[in-house]
Every structure is written in C-alpha cells, then in structure tokens.
Amino acid sequence: MNKSPQQLGKGMIYVAWLLLLGLLFMFFNYMSEKQYNPNQNVTSNNNNGI
C-alpha cells in the first residue's frame, strides 16, 4: 500500500470508466432487445413444393 494518491486516483478513474462503459452496454443492449421486432419468430409454409 505504498502507492501515491495520484496513482490511486488514476486507478479509480480507470475503474469508473470501465463501470460507465459496462452500464452503457447493458442499457443499450436492453433497449435493443425491448425494441419491437415483428419478424422475431419467423415460420415458413411449404405447400407440396408450390
């Protein structure tokens, strides 16, 4: 624990950025999954090759 306050501050800034990026990723992932998609479960019909 012989780190200077400046080194600890830099480490905390890096951790804060990583947390922010992680939260933004989770938020936009949630928003894109929530978006309406009418073709989410696509099915096809085959009528004897016609």
Image (cartoon, rainbow, N blue to C red):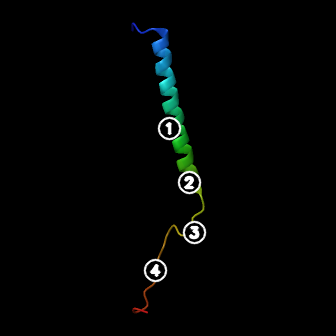
| Residue 9, position as x, y percentages in the image | 50, 16
- Mark 2 or mark 3: name the one nearer the start of the chain: 2
- Mark 1 or mark 2: name the one nearer the start of the chain: 1
Reading the image, the residue beneath label 2 is 32
Reading the image, the residue beneath label 4 is 44
Please say if 17 is above or below 50. Answer: above
Reading the image, the residue beneath label 3 is 38
Please say if 12 is above or below 1. Answer: below
Reading the image, the residue beneath label 1 is 22
How crowded pointer 1 is (Cα within 10 Å; few <14, some 14-19, many 20+) is rated as few
- Mark 3 or mark 4: name the one nearer the start of the chain: 3
Q: Quadrant of the C terminus?
A: bottom left
Q: Say whether marks 1 and 3 touch (CB < 8 Å).
A: no
Q: CA distance from mark 2 to mark 3?
A: 14 Å
- Mark 1 or mark 3: name the one nearer the start of the chain: 1
- Mark 4 or mark 1: name the one nearer the start of the chain: 1
Q: Which amino acid type is shown beneath numbered disc 2?
A: Ser
- Mark 4 or mark 2: name the one nearer the start of the chain: 2
Q: Which amino acid type is shown beneath numbered disc 3?
A: Pro
Q: Residue at x 60, y 62 (%)?
A: 36
Q: Quadrant of the N terminus?
A: top left
Q: CA distance from mark 1 to mark 3?
A: 29 Å
Q: CA distance from mark 4 to mark 2?
A: 25 Å
